[in-house]
Amino acid sequence: MTSHFHAIVWIDHQEARIFEFGATDVERIVVHANGVNHRLHQRSRDGGRAAVDKDFLRRVCAALEGIGALLITGPAGAKLELRDYIATHSPALAKRISSVEPLDHPNDAALVALARKYFRADDRMHAQRP
């Protein structure tokens, strides 16, 4: 991907949709979980929650390398799993997470519009700090 300062990632347990964007352009990448038939809230054989797909999170993290400011979104726990994975495995990227927000299943255009609106406000807020 071309290096842009802002990015949003929408993630569930099946895929991560990543959008890097500038003032006029957007680049999109989709990272799929290892098993195409993964289900949200998948359970292990013993009835507990299935283990976090660390390979999936590693590949998402690698796709976010070079980002200046990141907004993580998604339903349920996948967004928190990504945040925690980044905190443990990529502390430099963790410092660039602007926020982690719940978000159901928007289409790509709605997701990019939300990100642009969020970062316009976020950038203004950071510019006003002494």
Image (tube, helix red, strand yellow):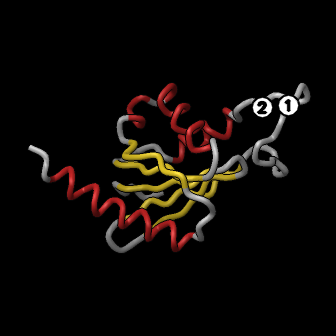
Label for residue 44?
Answer: 1
User: Do the CB atoms of the residues marked 1 and 2 lie less than 8 Å apart?
Assistant: yes
* Residue depicted at 63% across the width and 63% down the height: 105
What residue is shown with label 2? 49
Residue at the spot 37% in from the left edge and 56% down from the top edge: 6
Residue 73 horizontal/vertical position (percent) = 52, 52
Q: Nearer the N terminus, badge 1 or badge 2?
A: 1
How many C-alpha atoms fall within 10 Å of the one at disc 2: few (<14), some, or many (≥20)? Answer: few
Q: Which mark is residue 88?
A: none
**Residue at horizontal 55 percent and vertical 57 percent from the top:** 103
| 26 or 2: nearer the viewer | 26
Quadrant position of residue 51: top right
Q: Is residue 68 left or right of residue 54?
A: left
Q: Amino acid at mark 1?
A: Ser
Q: Give the position of the C terminus as an image quadrant.
A: top left
Q: Quick one: SS at disc 1? A: loop
| Cα gap from disc 1 to disc 2, whole angstroms | 6 Å
